[in-house]
Amino acid sequence: MELDLYSDERFMREALKEAVKAWDMDEVPVGAIVVSQNRIIARAHNLTERLQDVTAHAEMQAITAAANHIGAKYLTDCTLYVTLEPCSMCAGALFWSQVGKVVYGASDPKRGYISQAGKLHPRTEVVSGIEAEACSDLLVEFFRKKR
Amino acid sequence: MELDLYSDERFMREALKEAVKAWDMDEVPVGAIVVSQNRIIARAHNLTERLQDVTAHAEMQAITAAANHIGAKYLTDCTLYVTLEPCSMCAGALFWSQVGKVVYGASDPKRGYISQAGKLHPRTEVVSGIEAEACSDLLVEFFRKKR
């Protein structure tokens, strides 16, 4: 059996590690990473409670960090991995970033950009359902514990 | 003639001052302020070029600054004034912030949240067209000079 170091599954597990960091801080457990040429150039997780800032979603911070890393605002050669389908705000930011590819784990039928008629950039490739069960389980368990 | 210190027009002129600051930095001239109980608690303008960050729209920064100011993430008692109709990203952020009222100047038929089927929070009051000509003129002149 070969181990594919550069598979979507492998990178999604890195995003999952970020989601677990959010969990450990009692934040809604969503994590994101940005990959360029098979290198992780940004890692982030949800920080809306810690920062008391609704804009501090994992994707927003990952976009800003990746742009800082490459010194340019467009992420055309990058892939963003996120454990949960982006919301309208994050989809809007991803649109502006012209990110090359978005890979997400769990779907978000209620607040995800698809049900909200949000749009990514027409040149952005989208892959969904990668490690979806692990991504979703983390969220379900988080909210179960909160009740 | 009475001077209304707390009119939407007066506060929009403060947002316009922010837009002019963006212009002076060769940024697309959009400005925003957040008002709570007739006090300006946040001022911001577009900084996408300076920061090389597509998320650095005036509204995003104003939301973060206002939340920092009040020490809470919800802006239910606040009004955001912005010189241009918010895009989908900013509308998404405003949705999450549950901002009480949004007042914008110029419409943006191409990238504004309305044409993009974006949504604000159902409890957010929206007022448009305040000082629209001044807000629009600044943008038109900016892009005319760029050509």
Image (cartoon, coloured by chain):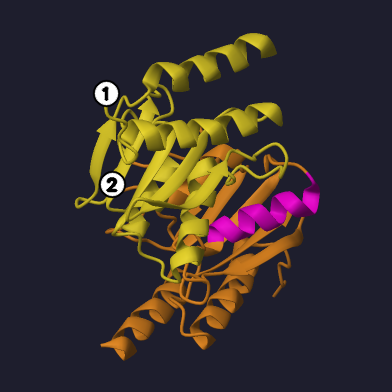
Chain colours: A orange, B yellow
Q: Name the residue under label 1.
A: B1
Q: In this view, does A56 lie to the left or right of B9?
A: right
Q: Which chain carries label 1?
A: B
- On screen, residue B17 above or below B121: above
Residue at 44% across / 62% down in the picture?
A54
- Dominant SS in magenta: helix
Front-most of A24 and A53?
Answer: A53
Find numbered disc 1 in the image and state the secondary structure of the residue it sits on.
Answer: loop
Q: Where is residue A70 in the image (x, y as percent from the top left)?
A: 79, 49
| Image position of B136 with respect to A137: above or below | above
Label 2: state its secondary structure: strand
Amino acid type assigned to the residue bearing label 2 in the image = Lys
Identify which residue, A146 or A139, lies in the foreground.
Answer: A146
Disc sitting over residue A9 in the figure? none
Amino acid at the residue labelled 1: Met
Whether marks 2 and 1 lie on the same chain: yes
Position of the N terminus of chain B, as image quadrant, is top left
Q: Earlier in the sequence, mark 2 or mark 1?
A: 1
Report the residue marked by disc 2.
B101
Does A58 lie within the magenta span? no
How many neighbours does mark 1 have within 10 angstroms: few (below 14), some (14-19), or many (20 or more)? few
Horizontal relation, residue A131 to residue B105: left or right: right
Q: Around disc 2, counting alpha carbons within 10 Å, would you say few (fewer than 14), some (14 to 19), or many (20 or more)? A: many
Quadrant of the image for the C terminus of chain B? Answer: top right
